[in-house]
Image: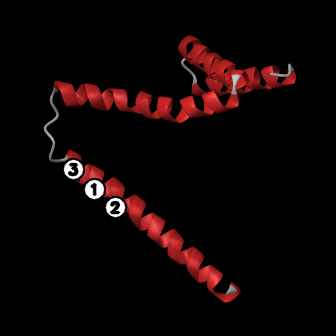
Amino acid sequence: MIANEPFAFMAALLAMSAATYLMRAGGFWLMGRVPIGPRVKRMLEALPGSVVAATVLPIVIKSGPSALVAVVASLAAMLVTRNDFCAVLAGIGAAALMRAGGF
């Protein structure tokens, strides 16, 4: 059984890589056939924020107040400085302070 583990790992890795490539290539292929009108353009512009919200919201709900404060601090730092690095530092610092305070 152990002799097959490297093969199974490589097969799984290749299958996941192929699936990822096909999804990305298929998306480009499909979008090449969609007329980009004002409605589609607005949807595509809103998509990155929707993906971030869908990723961050479950983490905030599960992690509690320290994660919420970290997200708010990151958002505030990003609005003020327009610098990704500063936003990350603000979020990490806020989460560390909240957790050090017992939250």
Q: Which residue is mark 2?
A: 22
How many numbered markers are drawn?
A: 3
Give the crowd class for mark 1: few <14, some 14-19, many >=20 residues within 10 Å: few
User: Residue 89, percent across and down?
Assistant: 70, 25
Considering the image in quadrants, where does the C terminus appear? top right
Give, as a three-letter code, the residue at label 2.
Answer: Leu
Res. 66 image quadrant:
top right
Considering the image in quadrants, where does the N terminus appear? bottom right
Res. 2 image quadrant:
bottom right
**Decide: marks 1, 2 in contact (CB < 8 A)?**
yes
Q: Secondary structure at mark 3?
A: helix
Q: Secondary structure at mark 1?
A: helix
User: Residue 25, percent across and down?
Assistant: 30, 57
Q: Which residue is mark 1?
A: 26
Q: Which residue is mark 3?
A: 30
Comes first in the chain, label 3 or label 2: 2
